[in-house]
Image (cartoon, rainbow, N blue to C red):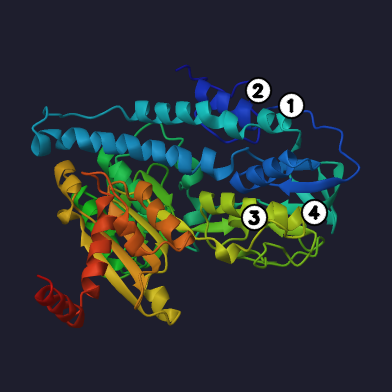
Amino acid sequence: MHQHDTAPADWPSHITLSPFDDANAQLVRTVAPKGWLAPVPKDRYHLVVIGAGTAGLVSAAIAAGLGARVALIERHLFGGDCLNFGCVPSKALLRAARSWHDARRAATDFGGPMVSGDGNFSAVMERLRRIRADISHVDGVERFKALGIDVFLGGATFVAPDAVRVGTTDLRFRRAIIATGARAARPAIPGLADTPYDTNDSIFSLTERPKRLVIIGGGPVGVELAQAFARFGTHVTIVHSHAQLLPRDDPDAAAIVTASLIADGVRLVHEARIERVSHDGSQFSVHMAGEPHVVPLVADRLLVATGRTPNVEGLGLDVARVQYTPQGVTVNDKLCTSNARIFAVGDVSSKLQFTHVADAQARLVVANALFFGVGGGRASTLVVPRVTYTDPEVAHVGMTREEAASAGQPIETMHVDLRENDRARLDGDTSGFLKVHVAAGSDRIVGATLVAAHAGEMIGEMTVAITNRVGLSALGKTIHPYPTQTEVFRRAADMWRKRKFTPRVGRLFAWWFRIVR
C-alpha cells in the first residue's frame, strides 16, 4: 500500500490520522472531505443534529426518512469514535492478535504445525486501516447528503435557544439533538500532560510494534488492548487503582480474564498510586508510591485508558439554556434537556457509553423530539447488554447480583461451568461460565453474565428473553443445536427445573406411580 511522506492535498489540516497512506486518504475523503461546500440553509429545520457519530447519524437518517428537514453538523470525522478510533479498529486489532495466539497454540493443543518467529505487525495495522476505509462509506458524508440531509462541516455553537451557528451560518430549528459524544479522559497525574502519551485516538495509528507498553487503566479498553499487544509480543504492564480488573463486572468473570492476561504475559499492578509520569524523549517512566514500586516502570509507549469525558465544551449550552455537568448534558427519561426544544443522546449524556446504546437512544429520541413522544419511549426501559472483547469474552445483561441486592430484588442464581459443555471442550475453550439470575420463586430472568470465547455473540439470547419477559423455563424448551456453546442456556434451565423438584413434589410422584399400574 502506497504511503505518502506528507499529507495528501485532499487531507484537511485539522485531521490527525496517520500514516498518510492510501487507506487513510480514502477514509478522510469519505468522512471529512476537504473543500466541502455547505448547502444553502433552510429557513427553519425540523431537526438539527450536532455530531455525526452513531447517535447523530442514526437520528438524522431516521428523521430524514420520515420526511423532516434535517441538518447534520460535524466538526471532525463522520462516524465518530466507533468507526475511526473505537469499535472498528479495535476489533480488527483483536482479531489479528487472536490469530497470532491460535497459531502459537496449534502445535501444543491440536497437533498442528510448529510456529515460531515474529509476525508482521505493520501488516496487521495496514489491514486495520484498509478495512476501516472500505466500510466507512456507510457513515460517509456523501451518503447522508444523498438521504436529503443538509451536511455542515465545522464546529457548532448555540446562539439562541432555537438556533445554532456553524462558521458564519446560523441554522434555526424546531428541535435539536446534541450527539457530540465523548473523548478519552486525562487523569490528574503530575507530568502526564507534558508527555506524548497515547489514547484510543492515537494507538491505532501505530505502524511499529512497541517493545514495552504501560497501560494506565484496568477497564474494558485497557484489558482488551493489553491482551492484544501481549499476543503480538509486546511486554505489557497494566497499572490501575482497583483491587481487580474490570471492577464493574462479576468478580468471577474478572478473575478468569486476569488469569488469561497473566498467561499471555501481561504484568498487573493492582491498587496502584501513580505519583508522576515523565518522558525523556525516547521512553516513559511511571513513578508509583510505596513498596515494591520504588523503581519506576519504563516503557516505549504509554496508553491512558481511564474512561471518557463528554464533549460539552464550546457548544454554547448556557446560551441554549441547557443544563450540564462535567459528567455530560443532563436529560430526563425521554432524553430531553432543560430546554424543551433540545434533546441529547449517546456518550455526551448517557452513563452507558456504548455504540449500541447510542443507536438505541437515537431510535427513541426522534419520535420523542418530533412527534411529542408518540412512538418513542423512555431510556430507562432499554435492556442493554455489554461485552468486553478479551479472550475469553465477558458479556453481561440486566442486573448483577449486587444491583439486585441494592434494589431489594431476591434472586436465585443458576451457574453453569463451561467445562461441562461439550463444544467448549472440543474447542479447547473451557475457561468460562454462565450465571443466570432469576427472580426468587419464579423463572423470570433479571440478569445474566456469560464468560466464553464468543460470549458477545451469545448474550443476545438472554437480552431477548429479558426484553420480552421470556422465562428461563421457555429457553429450556427451545432446541439448541448440538454441539454448540449455546447449550449452556438449556443447561441453566434444567438446573432451575431440578430446583423445583422439591421433596414434596417427589412424594407426589412416588404416590402417583404407586397407584398407576
Q: Are marks 3 and 2 in contact (CB under 8 Å)?
A: no
The residue beneath circle 4 is: 175
Nearer mark to the viewer, of 3 and 4: 3
Instruction: Say above or below: 319 vs 59.
Output: below
Classify mark 4: residues with Cα within 10 Å, few (<14), some (14-19) or many (20+). Answer: many
Mark 1 and mark 4: Cα distance apart in space: 28 Å
Eye-nearest disc, 1 or 4: 4
Name the residue: 46% across, 46% down: 198
Q: Residue furthest right?
A: 43
Give the CA distance from mark 3 to mark 1: 34 Å
Q: Earlier in the sequence, mark 3 or mark 4?
A: 4
Q: Which residue is mark 1?
A: 35
331 relative position to 218: left or right? right
Q: Residue furthest front?
A: 517
| In this rendering, position of residue 34 left or right of residue 54 | right
Q: Which residue is mark 2?
A: 10
